[in-house]
Image: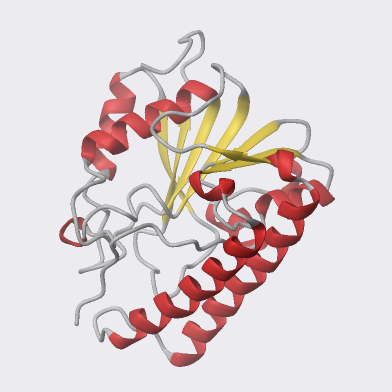
Amino acid sequence: MPFSLDHAVFFGRTWDECLGMYALKESDLSGIKILDCPGGPDALVAEGLTRGLDICAIDPLYDSKLEDLEARGRKEITDTMAAWQLDPDTAWGDHKAEEFKNLKLAALDSFIEAFAAHPERYIVGSLPELPFSDDSFDLALSGNFLFVYASVERGGLMSTDELDLDFHLESVRELLRVAKEVRMFPSFAVTGPARRQEFVDPVMEALRSDGHQVDLVPAQWVEGDFTEFNHLIRIRKAAGSGPAS
């Protein structure tokens, strides 16, 4: 049965994965305000806080109990990877799939520890409407949600087209409202033939029309077998533009 999902799963990434995805060095993050959106069970806030960074995350599931988040994360990581491996069109080699799963579980462990110790750093909310004032952050990082949860027909993971182009445009503009720079990963299609995900080009074109600087930047992390079109999208708000359009 072809792989698809009916909701966004509670997957996270480790610190090293995140730095590679967004083509960042640790020194790039010092002295700025950072948002992880949606944060899920990323280790980004957990590891960032140990390094003295000013960082927080937002996710609609952060209103859940700690034990429920941990149980959900472990189940969805295990079940999703098992389903991914059952589809010959998506399956990776067993070693690569097991390594990927173990990294997700490691990120979850870091998240759970930090969520318990620093609940104020984990804010409840979701795109396309964020509970922050304009320019609250210097940098917003958004990974493995936008473009990934488009429909399977458009190179995403979803069985429906609920997160359509309008949703993507509204969400990215909201990220630009609250942050001076936005980095998003990935830009490749995660299902079907190797290609750029269908919404990437129209989103980039719209943001350039809004006056922002938009670039595709090579990522420094390879997600599974996705070696082609392995770029993040970097958007820098136009100087003096005020909130995003």
Residue 171: percent from left, percent from top: 37, 33
Q: Name the residue located 54 percent from the left edge and 30 percent from the top edge.
A: 181
Locate the C terminus and report the quarter of the image it occupies: top left
Q: Name the residue located 38 percent from the left edge and 26 percent from the top edge.
A: 173
**Quarter-wise, where is residue 107 in the image?**
bottom right
- Image mark count: 0
Q: Name the residue located 66 percent from the left edge and 71 percent from the top edge.
A: 106
Q: Nearer the viewer, residue 1 or 188?
A: 1
Residue 83: percent from left, percent from top: 34, 81
* Snapshot colouring: secondary structure
Instruction: Give the side of residue 243 with respect to residue 84, left or right.
Output: right
Residue 183: percent from left, percent from top: 50, 40
Query: Is residue 103 placed above or below 140 in the rendered structure?
Result: below
Locate the N terminus and report the quarter of the image it occupies: bottom left
Instruction: Give the side of residue 127 with respect to residue 28, left or right.
Output: left
Judged from this view, the residue extending furthest toward the left is: 153
Q: Nearer the viewer, residue 30 or 216?
A: 30
Q: Name the residue located 25 percent from the left edge and 86 percent from the top edge.
A: 88
Residue 10: percent from left, percent from top: 49, 61
Query: Is residue 135 placed above or below 35 in the rendered structure?
Result: above
Query: Is residue 181 placed above or below 100 in the rendered structure?
Result: above
